[in-house]
Image (cartoon, grey):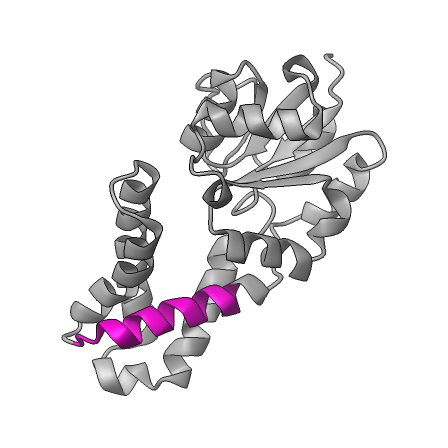
């Protein structure tokens, strides 16, 4: 099997449990502000609506059709308006409190630390992540991931996002890595797998679905499966 030297990981939903941390943070703020009374809705209904709005806005943000500031303002404002609550100033403050609180949470994906401990002695590891600069490094520090990684490349600080090949080129350059010695590990096929393919880097697609390989170098269903590859 090919000998890799550099491992590039995605962060959210690959190592850091975004869904659990996000839900916990929004629930905390929902209760803090008494939103069940204000919006006349239970948390699970509110959160489902938010997830749909957030997914839509992140999709257009990745395509460059809205700015970071527009995303910050709109995702909670649009959600609140679905429940007849129209206060853009509060929505923006709620968003910024959410980003700070969510980033401070430390839930990781199953077996994340176990696999990183296994890999660290034999590989140089890095992170390539889409997201906001003010959030991603906090996540890494608070969850203890900083110990494992040499370079952390965040799209927000560069002006281009995965799957743009420029972020992979930049990451390899700052890491001192060659493409044939590198592999990308991520859960999002478009940004992680297609982005790595664009620069000729091998890929590991982490997916919960029991599906056939659709073109990535490797498919795994648990981080522990990396032991079969690396």
Q: Quadrant of the C terminus?
A: top right
146 on left or right of 47: right
Q: Can see residue 220?
A: no
Q: Is 124 in front, or is 157?
A: 157
- Give the residue drawn at x 42%, y 35%: 160
- The residue at the far left in this view is 84
Residue farthest right in this picture: 121
* Figure quadrant of the N terminus: top right
The span picked out in magenta is: 85-102
Q: In the rendered view, does 25 fall on the left or right side of 66? A: right
Residue drawn at the location 17% of the way across and 73% of the way down: 83
Q: Using the image as rendered, state which of residue 223 and residue 120 is in the foreground.
A: 120
Residue 86 screen position, x and y as percent: 17, 74
Q: In this rendering, is residue 134 above or below 220?
A: below
| In the displayed structure image, the side of residue 159 where residue 168 appears, left or right | right
Most prominent secondary structure in the magenta stretch?
helix
Image x and y of residue 210, in percent: 47, 31
Asked whether residue 165 appears in the rendered view, the answer is: yes
- Residue 170 in percent (x, y) is at 57, 28
Q: Is residue 228 magenta?
A: no
Across and down, in percent, residue 32 comes to 41, 84
Determine which quarter of the picture holds residue 177: top right
Q: Residue at x 58, y 65 (%)?
A: 105
Viewer-nearest residue: 185 or 94? 94
The reply, left or right, for residue 23 in relation to residue 9 is: left
Q: Quadrant of residue 186?
A: top right
**The magenta stretch spans residue 86:** yes
For image coordinates 66% across by 30% down, the residue present is: 174
What is the count of numbered marks? 0
Residue 194, placed above or below residue 89: above
């Amino acid at each position: 099997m090919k000998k890799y030297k550099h491992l590039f990981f995605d962060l959210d939903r690959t190592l850091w449990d975004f869904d659990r941390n996000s839900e916990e943070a929004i629930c905390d703020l929902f209760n803090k502000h008494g939103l069940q009374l204000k919006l006349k809705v239970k948390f699970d209904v509110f959160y489902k609506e938010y997830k749909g709005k957030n997914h839509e806005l992140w999709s257009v943000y990745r395509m460059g059709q809205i700015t970071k500031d527009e995303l910050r303002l709109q995702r909670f404002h649009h959600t609140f308006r679905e429940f007849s609550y129209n206060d853009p100033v509060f929505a923006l403050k709620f968003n910024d409190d959410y980003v700070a609180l969510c980033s401070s949470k430390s839930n990781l994906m199953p077996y994340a630390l176990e696999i990183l401990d296994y890999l660290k002695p034999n590989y140089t590891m890095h992170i390539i992540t889409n997201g906001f600069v003010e959030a991603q490094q906090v996540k890494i520090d608070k969850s203890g991931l900083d110990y494992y990684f040499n370079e952390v490349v965040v799209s927000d600080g560069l002006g281009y996002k995965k799957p743009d090949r420029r972020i992979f080129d930049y990451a390899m350059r700052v890491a001192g890595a060659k493409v044939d010695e590198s592999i990308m590990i991520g859960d999002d096929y478009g940004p992680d797998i297609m982005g790595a393919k664009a620069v000729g880097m091998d890929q590991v697609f982490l997916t919960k679905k029991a599906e056939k390989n659709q073109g990535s170098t490797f498919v795994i269903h648990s981080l522990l499966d990396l032991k079969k590859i690396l």
